[in-house]
Amino acid sequence: MNQNSFDLIPHVVINPSTIVTYSEVIWNKPHSRQSLPESFIKSKRTSQGQVSNIAHRKITKAVEYLTTVAHQKKVYEKVTMKYITFKVAFVTLTLPSQQIHDDKTILNTCLNSLLNEIRQYYYVKNYIWRAETQYNGNIHFHLIIDQYIPWYELRNRWNRIINKLGYVDRFYEKFAHYTPNSIDIHSTRKIKNLKNYLSKYMGKNATHTYKGRPLEGPERSMTGRLWGCNYELSNCRGFNTEVDSEIASELTKILSDSKIRKHESVYFTVYYVDYKTFRKVGSNLLFKYFSDYLFEKLGFSEQLTF
């Protein structure tokens, strides 16, 4: 037997809107590996203020899982005295006066404090945040959460937190009141493909503009982390299993539709298909496997939505 012989074990990875097939390489005997150059081992990747392709894929997957497990629901809005249809909240958090602290300080002191509070007082389980710079040089944050928070309560909490660093006090010196409109809640109710919209928004690399026109001059690069999410979302990598005869039969039912888009490479194939269609084609086993995966990772039960 050749000392470098190997076996290929077919695998399938299921995510909310994709199926990935690939083969795992199992070497029968240890094979020689070329040692990596020392410069590569010591190197550290830095964002340089830009979202890399890898980070963009991770953001997309986090958004995919958050929008999958977020329930469509109605909540009562006390100010308008009306019920509103709600699934996720998409919020922008800004500083009401010129930034005088570094990005890391704003992130650690302000954003992390807000995340801790909304988890504690509003039972937010899943969230994704993204940091960017505005045209005025200030850092701001985009935040997706799975719970409804009245805008005035969220604004008051954010203003109180950022004033630990004096940003509301400095706003008062100029405008003579202590209630800056430091948050903006984006309406997502009429967006048809919410996952794609949020993924593009959260994963884009900003081009600074003002009133629709690109700004001249150098852009300020972000320092520190550019995005993050709760641990449970970051740990969702898809249900992964070996392909036996039973699973192969169910995959055939799902992937036999010629209209399914796919992307093929040398090492894997991605099929773009929503997991909720599994039951429609009789692939009940894979539907159960992935539903159990969602429950294990995020506590999500299909019985709540069907």
Image (cartoon, grey):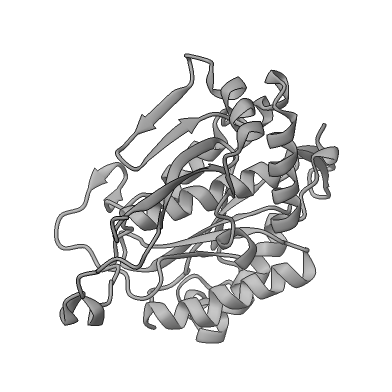
Give the residue displayed 53% in from the left and 41% down from the top. Answer: 12
Above or below, 46 against 61 in this view is: below
In the image, 284 versus 236, the foreground residue is 284
Q: Is residue 270 rendered to the left or right of residue 32?
A: right
Residue 265 in sight from this viewpoint: yes
How many numbered circles does the render carry? 0
Q: Is residue 3 rendered to the left or right of residue 225?
A: left
Above or below, 270 against 148 in this view is: above
In the image, 107 versus 84, the foreground residue is 107
Above or below, 261 against 268 in this view is: above
Residue 87 in sight from this viewpoint: no
Give the residue displayed 34% in from the left and 43% down from the top. Answer: 267
* Residue 59 position within the rendered picture, expressed as x and y whole percent measured from the top left: 47, 53
In the image, 242 versus 49, the foreground residue is 242
Give the residue displayed 76% in from the left and 51% down from the top. Answer: 295
* Residue 136 position within the rendered picture, expressed as x and y whole percent measured from the top left: 31, 64
Residue 252, quarter of the rendered image: top right
Residue 135, quarter of the rendered image: bottom left
* Residue 210 position within the rendered picture, expressed as x and y whole percent measured from the top left: 30, 49
* Residue 60 position within the rendered picture, expressed as x and y whole percent measured from the top left: 47, 48
Hey, which residue is sitting farthest top in the picture?
258
Q: Quadrant of the N terminus?
A: bottom left
Give the residue displayed 43% in from the left and 72% down from the top. Answer: 97
Residue 224, quarter of the rendered image: bottom left
Q: Quadrant of the C terminus?
A: top right
